[in-house]
Amino acid sequence: VREQGRSEGELKVANDELQQNSATLRDRGEVIELLGGMAHRMQASRTDDELAQVIRVFVPRVLPGIPGALYAHNNSRNLLLPIAGWNGLEPDVEGFAPDGCWALRRGQSHFVREPNSDIICSHVGGHDEIYHCEPLLAGGEVIGTLHFRGMIEQENRFRLAVMAENIASALVNHRLQRGLREQTIRDPLTSLFNRRYMEETLGLEIARSARSGVPL
């Protein structure tokens, strides 16, 4: 009887672990599917506004209820400028210097679970704020940071890691596409638009004129 009771107890523990692992795998599968849709839309974005819109729509779905903002390096790499904010957090439009974030200095996550428990980033509003900063890395290079007002609990670390990797890749590709686009439509010396841009724009304006009946 004792052996049967012990065996039943072990079976119950094994069954509970199996159900927990199954739920974890199911949750991760749903997250990967959601992040896949987010990555496809980011890769298809053609403007900064479109990229920001994708961020604002999908990040709150990946990490519900956590306010945050995305910052990325400017062209001179001496300032991090806001790309998007979500869940009520309005990022500082002036941005901040890279040295103002400890996650960027260290190249790894930096968070404060309770007041006075760690060094506070200078870009954070108050010294009593609970927050999490996650650097965005691509090819060994830091290109931006995710800032969250609140803690990212252990069960959400997988979501954060995959999402940060996808956003970093999308930012790099977006900048490459924008740079290539600028090279094809502008003169490299004067930065003036060239004939290719004139032909593209003229075609659009002629079509618009034909639709609206307004002279061109």
Image (cartoon, rainbow, N blue to C red):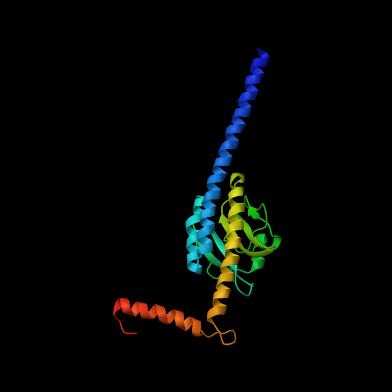
| Residue at 59% from the left image edge and 87% from the top image edge | 189
Tell me residue 35's x, y (percent).
54, 53
Q: Position of residue 23 (x, y in %)?
A: 56, 38
* Viewer-side residue, 53 vs 89: 53
Instruction: Tell which residue pokes out farthest to the bottom in this image.
Output: 190
Quarter location, residue 10: top right
Q: Residue 148, relative to residue 200: is it above or below? A: above
Q: Quadrant of residue 123?
A: bottom right
Does residue 179 appear left or right of residue 58 in this picture?
A: right
Q: Residue at x 51, y 51 (%)?
A: 34
Left or right: 179 as drawn, with respect to 107: left
Q: Is residue 130 visible?
A: no
Q: Is residue 156 visible?
A: yes
Q: Residue at x 52, y 56 (%)?
A: 38
Residue placed most toward the observer, 128 or 24? 24
Whole-percent x, y for residue 83 in the image: 53, 65
Residue 112 appears at what percent x and percent y? 63, 53
Q: Quadrant of the C terminus?
A: bottom left
Q: In the image as oriented, which residue stretches furthest toward the top? A: 1
Count of picture labels: 0
Residue at image position (55%, 43%) is: 27
Q: Is residue 188 above or below residue 62?
A: below
Give the vertical position of 3 relative to 86 (above or below). above
- For the N terminus, the image quarter is top right
Q: Nearer the viewer, residue 209 or 109?
A: 209
Q: Quadrant of residue 176?
A: bottom right
